[in-house]
Amino acid sequence: MELSFSKPFSELRVGEFVYTTAPSIPLTHCFTTRFGGVSEGPLESLNLGENRGDKPENVKENYRVVRAALGFESAPLCFTKQVHKTDVRVVTAADAREPFDPFPYEADGIVSSQIGLALVCFTADCVPVLLCDPVAHVAGAIHCGWRSTVADILCAAVEKMVSLGATSENLHAAIGPGIEMCCFETGPEVAEGVSKLLGSDADGTYFAVPGTGKFMVDLKETDRRRLLQLGLLDENISVSDECTSCNSDKYWSHRKTGGERGTQAAFIVVG
């Protein structure tokens, strides 16, 4: 399978808030960075994670910054307690919550056809994937860690979106900033999972590190190829070229910091 030559992501700034967007997504969306919030110390400055020991008032202000910058201050927020599995939930405004409200469910992907609803997924090395069918007005936010990726969460997401009226040929995808092959050393189980997922399309998505029993794995390319297998068109897929570990001054990276980090998020507003 040939490599993608999609247009690069754009980096934008509103005041101190810095974020990126993908040319393949025609809806309001963003992938946040570490910049533009009010969190302090090791979590400076735009931490969006509620479970990192941050002050609730700081996290809530950070969300206000993002929502104001993107113009969806009044949009209900839907996000989820991510557990590295493959559950994808269809959500409505009834599932919305504000930061530090109780999580009503666990899932690593959420999709919706309710216009105006803002969908969110969290990452700090795992790959965020935003999906939308602008014709059917269906969108999704998918957390693609290696476990959920090889267990085929993207297939579950596409199937749920199709059930809401989307079609694979009209789906657009953005594979956001995440850890890249250069920094993602794994055990053999990850490479084996990628091989099982992609079959004959897995060539080049991982390689063995001689004499170590370890593998270097390309999660972004794995996700891109799986989306193509699921019927998306290559021209409708954008892939970020930024590695969160290499760019840990810009993005939160769990591996680079040994877990002493904040959380970034990907947002998409159904429209």
Image (spheres, rainbow, N blue to C red):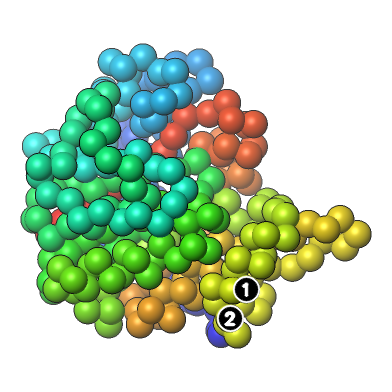
Residue 162, image x, y percentages: 21, 73
Query: Label 1 sits on what residue type?
Result: Ser
Is 8 in front, or is 28?
28
At x 41%, y 74%, the residue is: 227
**Within 10 Å of the Cα at label 2, are there few (<14), some (14-19), or many (20+) other Cα atoms?**
few
Which residue is at a point 73% across and 60% down the rendered structure image?
188
Amino acid type assigned to the residue bearing label 2 in the image: Gly
- Residues at discs 2 and 1 in contact (Cβ within 8 Å): yes
Front-most of 102 and 142? 102
CA distance separating discs 2 and 1: 5 Å
Which one is in front, 13 or 264?
Answer: 264
Q: The C terminus is located in which quarter?
A: bottom left
Could you tell me if residue 26 is visible in this image?
A: no
User: Residue 93: image x %, image y %?
Assistant: 10, 44
Direction from residue 89 to residue 135 in the image, left or right: left
Q: Quadrant of the N terminus?
A: bottom right
Give the labeled residue for mark 2: 199
Name the residue tied to disc 1: 195
Name the residue located 64 percent from the left edge and 37 percent from the top edge: 256
User: In this rendering, would 267 be left or right of 54?
Assistant: left
Classify mark 1: residues with Cα within 10 Å, few (<14), some (14-19) or many (20+): some
Examine the rendered structure and indicate whether residue 16 appears above or below residue 214. above
- The residue positioned 47% from the left and 29% from the top of the image is 262
SS for tag 2? helix
**Hey, which quadrant is residue 32 in on the image?**
top left
What percent of the width, then of the height, locates residue 218? 61, 63
* Image spot of residue 125 (x, y percent): 53, 46
